[in-house]
Amino acid sequence: PIDAIREMARIAKKVIVIVEINNTNLPIFLVTLLYRSVERNAVRYNLGKVKRMVTDAGMEIVYAGHLNSKFISGNSILHQIGARFGAKPYNIVIGKQAGR
């Protein structure tokens, strides 16, 4: 993933945006366990991991937080209940090239 982030940064005009699942959201975590043969590393992606990947790629973080979206895959009642208990289903990290 770090090489992919570096390439995104290389071709980006201003910033890159990474939206990744939040494994601290219980419904998302359970679904990733269920489909772990498809996305083996998905259970590892929390906000800290995504931020580290961006900084390890040599970028500065402009914004990092959680995203509650009902349009990607969080439209089920289970996702909405999980989000009400403080764990939103997605992480969002916006990064820019250091020094730009």
Image (tube, rainbow, N blue to C red):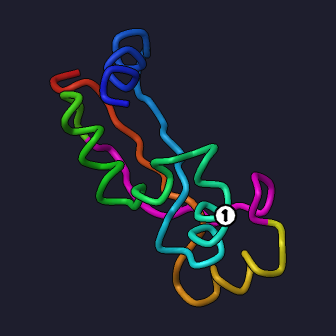
15 part of magenta stretch = no
Q: Residue at x 64, y 87 (%)?
A: 84
72 part of magenta stretch = yes
Mark 1 lies on a secondary structure that is helix
Question: What is the residue that sits farthest to the top in this orientation?
Answer: 11
Q: Residues within 10 Å of mark 1 (few under 14, many from 20)?
A: few
Residue beneath label 1, please? Answer: 34
Nearer to us in this view, 67 or 57: 57
Q: Residue at x 43, y 61 (%)?
A: 65
Q: How many marks?
A: 1
x, y percent for residue 76: 83, 72
Check disc 1 and give the amino acid type: Leu
Left or right: residue 64 compared with residue 67: left
Quadrant in the rendering for residue 34: bottom right
Question: What is the residue that sits farthest to the front in this orientation?
Answer: 37
Left or right: residue 28 compared with residue 59: right
Quadrant in the rendering for residue 64: bottom left
Q: Residue at x 37, y 14 (%)?
A: 7
Question: What is the residue that sits farthest to the bottom in this orientation?
Answer: 85
* Quadrant location, the N terminus: top left
> In this rendering, is residue 33 above or below 41?
below
x, y percent for residue 45: 42, 55
Residue interval drawn in magenta: 61-74
Nearer to us in this view, 88 or 36: 36
Left or right: residue 65 compared with residue 10: right
Q: Residue at x 23, y 31 (%)?
A: 59
Quadrant in the rendering for residue 2: top left
Nearer to us in this view, 14 or 35: 35
> In this rendering, is residue 92 above or below 8?
below
Nearer to us in this view, 43 or 56: 43
x, y percent for residue 51: 30, 49
